[in-house]
């Protein structure tokens, strides 16, 4: 088992990704509002530190927040399907920094209803 994490800066792609997951048989995911450290620093109003102003100019006001999606997948095959869905959807996006994905292996899942996997 694996957990796939997707940090999505282009949140306009979110609904298409979730629809693609459903089509591939991925029935569950958790979505969290998130913000990267660079964006958080850039959007502070600390004018005393010149680096923050430079960072603010570089990043601009585009996409100050992200969505972090994570889903538990039973097999490498399902991970490959999920990654393929995301790559296909974001491939049309021409902007820089669309996001990133990574997986983490899971040793065991403990559910709250007592059915451990």
Image: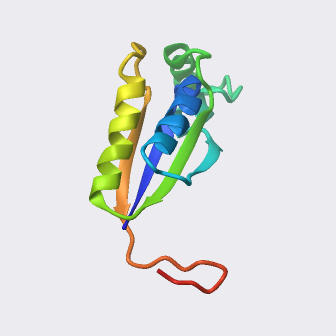
User: What count of labels does the image hold?
Assistant: 0
Along the line of sight, which residue is nearer the eye, 26 or 45? 26
Q: Left or right? Give the position of 111 relative to 46.
A: left
Q: Position of residue 80 (x, y in %)?
A: 29, 47
Q: In terms of depth relative to the viewer, which is nearer, 94 or 117?
A: 117
Where does residue 38 sit, x and y in percent of width and height? 52, 33
Name the spot of residue 7 as percent of width and height, x first: 49, 40
Which residue ends up furthest to the bottom in the rendered image? 114
Residue 53 located left or right of residue 113: left
Rendered image coloring scheme: rainbow
Q: At x 60% / y 38%, what residue is drawn?
A: 35
Q: Residue furthest right?
A: 45
- x, y percent for residue 63: 59, 23
* x 47%, y 40%: residue: 23
In the image, residue 107 above or below residue 34: below
- Image point (59%, 31%), residue name: 15
> In which quadrant is the N terminus drawn?
bottom left
Quadrant hosting residue 77: bottom left
């Amino acid at each position: 088992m694996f957990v796939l994490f997707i940090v999505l800066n282009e949140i306009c792609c979110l609904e298409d990704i979730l629809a693609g997951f459903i089509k591939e048989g991925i029935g569950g995911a958790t979505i969290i509002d998130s913000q990267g450290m660079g964006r958080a620093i850039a959007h502070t109003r600390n004018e005393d530190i010149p680096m923050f102003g430079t960072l603010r100019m570089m990043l601009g006001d585009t996409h100050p927040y992200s969505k972090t999606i994570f889903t538990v997948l039973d097999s490498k095959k399902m991970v490959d399907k999920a990654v393929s869905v995301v790559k296909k959807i974001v491939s049309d996006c021409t902007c820089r920094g669309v996001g990133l994905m990574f997986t983490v292996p899971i040793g065991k899942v403990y559910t709250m209803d007592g059915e451990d996997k």
